[in-house]
Image (cartoon, helix red, strand yellow):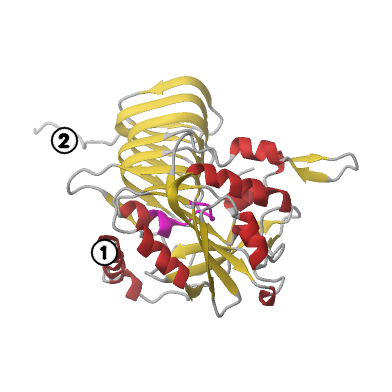
Amino acid sequence: MDAPKYETRHEVAHIGKAVLIKGELSGSEDLYLDGEVEGTIELHQNSVTIGPNAKIRAHVNAREVIIHGKVDGNIHGAERVELKRSAVLVGDIRTQRVAVEDGAFFKGSIDVQRVEGKSEVTADAAYANAGAAAATVPALAEKK
Amino acid sequence: MGSVTHSFFKFFRSAGSSGKESQPRELPVRSRRHSTAFKEFMRSVGGQEELSFLDLGATSATNISLLTGQGHKLRTEDLLGSSFEPEFYAPDELGAKILDVDRFLKENLQFHGQQFDAVFFWDIADYLPETLVKPVIERIFTGMKPGGMLLAFFHTKDAGPEAPYSRYHIVGEDALDLQPLMVSNGGGGSSLVKLQRVFNNRHIENLFRDYASLKFFLARDNIREVLVIR
């Protein structure tokens, strides 16, 4: 009988919305973070997804950072940073590729680091709110 | 200058040729206006790479994509949105809540030594709380490079008090899309941000009196466009 074949499973650690972490959060697997973090987040080789309930007061350093929730801190995404429409980011972004959806609140600087043939900024979401009668200022409706 | 103008067109060509724009979609509730001052602004700051831009309007994915895609550095601050945040308001002796300008400026327009070549001020001055207008323009002055350029729009009185505050999207070499924005009214609803005041030319000159020069453009749609040189 052949040995059973195991599928390669993409591991994603999950931190729920009732969790508060103070200090340094580091690791070597992808992370979905929906809780609160105060300190630093270091996942150099991995992806961090900051969920819609997350409240982060930390600098984030990862290969890829996707933000749905609130972040107060600088973001370094070695490959990519993505701000979803519910994102509220106060801090600077440093990355090679950045995508921002309309509706995202962003206060800070963006430094897109050019690597030959890789630097890219997407405008896919530019008309994401096109059908809405009017957009709500996120800072007022959601930030507080 | 030529390279930026060229790459501008290239950006819009590539966006339009992606196929996405040709797909059926609901009509965007945006109005498009053509701006001579904006065209001159981009022409004037063009020709250089890695310029530093400051966009003080509501966050626009389009503007971020365009400017960073061109290799420029960009800082965005939703100045008007920040001015509504309750943390900056304190009661006066009569109990009325007034904006604490010093506190606001401690947490906004902090450039940390960064100096900007170009500033999009849009029409924010027409909507900001009165006490913020002059201090904000003075603070921007400190963050601009000598010779740097600022683009501002001011409504004329014919625009009427209902003229809504909008998010500005750069969509062409002289074209801007305006997307009206709503604010929470505290009762679970939301409403448009309306014009707070109208500046005349003399007012505008006074606001920017520390700057090197101003150039006015009177548009047909009750907007006075101004290019200001630091």
Does the segment drawn in magenta span residue B56? yes
Q: At x 30% / y 55%, what residue is drawn?
A: B70
Label count reads 2
Which residue is situated farthest in the top direction here? A23
Horizontal arrangement in the rendering, residue B11 relative to residue A73 (left or right): left
Seen from the viewer's position, the closer of residues A111 and B15 is: A111
Q: Residue at x 71, y 64 (%)?
A: B197
Labels 1, 2: front one = 1
Question: Left or right: B23 with respect to B222?
Answer: left
A130 and B164: which one is in front?
A: B164
State the image coordinates of residue A21 (x, y, percent, origin top left).
51, 23
Q: Residues within 10 Å of mark 2 (few under 14, many from 20)?
A: few
Residue type of the residue flagged with mark 1: Gly
Location of residue B206 in the rendering, given as x and y in whole percent from the top left corner: 65, 57
Judged from this view, the residue extending furthest toward the bottom is B220
Q: Pinpoint the chain carrying mark 1.
A: B
Q: Is residue B182 visible?
A: no
Q: Which residue is mark 2?
A: A5
Q: Badge 1 local density, few (<14 within 10 Å), some, or many (20+)?
A: few
Task: Give the Cα distance between marks 1 and 2.
Answer: 59 Å
Kindly indicate the quadrant of the structure image that contains residue A62: top left
In the picture, which quadrant includes the N terminus of chain B? Answer: bottom left
B146 in magenta: no
Which span is picked out in magenta?
Answer: B55-64
Task: Tell which of A68 and B204 is nearer to you.
Answer: B204
Residue at coordinates 72% horizontally, 49% vertically from top-left? B131
Quadrant position of residue A59: top left
Q: Which mark is residue B133?
A: none
Q: Amino acid at mark 2?
A: Lys
- Specify whether residue B29 is in view: yes
Q: Which residue is mark 1?
A: B2
Residue B26 x, y percent position in the rendering: 47, 75
